[in-house]
Image (cartoon, helix red, strand yellow):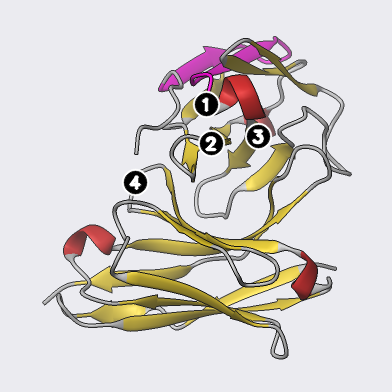
Amino acid sequence: QAGLTQPPSVSKGLRQTATLTCTGNSNNVGNQGAAWLQQHQGHPPKLLSYRNNNRPSGISERLSASRSGNTASLTISGLQPEDEADYYCSAWDSNLGAWVFGGGTKLTVL
Amino acid sequence: QVQLVESGGGVVQPGRSLRLSCAASGFTFSRFDMHWVRQAPGKGLEWVTSISYHGNNEYYADSVKGRFTISRDISKTTLYLQMNSLSAEDTAVYYCAREGGEGGPAHDYWGQGALVTVSS
């Protein structure tokens, strides 16, 4: 099953803004939206944003999700050391009848 | 608070079977679709399977279709994953996850994971 496309790595400086992207097609991201997850090494993933771009309770307002066509984006402003992690997007694919994940983006905060 | 606790992982020989369990608490188990997602060592997340809240619908990734079976016991608030004909490619941490969120559901709660190693 084809997954979503994410850049393998992004590097930004402390207190800067990072925008992570996730590209799918009209059967998944374009139709259903994408969720965003954060994973620190050795820990389970943590949901950052639902597919409708809403943040779960307790997630920082420095994070915002959006979508344009078949591409979803996660913007993290005022980068902090604790933002350094792997970020995954996920979506339901109505054609495949399956959930698909992106390959993940490793965010490095310099 | 929502808790998902996986158990049943371990080392298994190729071709053998293993069953994972996920004990759920802190929410009404019968109202949520549930999933298994795996992560091979050093790799990304891979969706494996899901089951509807009432247990009537199941979905599987092509990579496990015909070999894995998801099920749930509402009375025990437990999710299961029966894995048959295991191969080295199935070696991964297996996470149990809840699907929640009105209007834009996603995997909103995750367990700590169970490591499955397929090796002779």
Q: Are marks 3 and 1 on the same chain?
A: yes
Where residue A79 sits: x, y (%)?
71, 20
Q: CA distance from mark 3 to mark 4?
A: 22 Å
Local secondary structure at mark 2: loop
Crowding near the residue tagged with mark 4, few <14, some 14–19, many ≥20 C-alpha atoms within 10 Å: few
Crowding near the residue tagged with mark 2, few <14, some 14–19, many ≥20 C-alpha atoms within 10 Å: few
Q: CA distance from mark 2 to mark 4?
A: 29 Å
Q: CA distance from mark 4 to mark 1?
A: 28 Å
A21 magenta-colored: yes
Where residue B100 sits: x, y (%)?
75, 52
- Along the line of sight, which residue is nearer the eye, A16 or B46? B46
> Disc 1 marks which residue?
A27
Q: Earlier in the sequence, mark 3 or mark 1?
A: 1
Q: CA distance from mark 3 to mark 1?
A: 15 Å
Q: Chain of mark 2?
A: A
Q: Chain of mark 1?
A: A
Q: Tag 4: residue type?
A: Gly
Report whether B10 appears left or right of B81.
left
Residue range of the region highlighted in magenta in the rendering: A8-26
Where residue B37 sits: x, y (%)?
48, 56
- Along the line of sight, which residue is nearer the eye, A85 or B112? B112
Q: Which of pointers 2 and 4 indicates the residue nearer the eye?
A: 2
Extreme residue toward the left, this view: B120
Q: CA distance from mark 1 to mark 2?
A: 6 Å
Local secondary structure at mark 3: strand
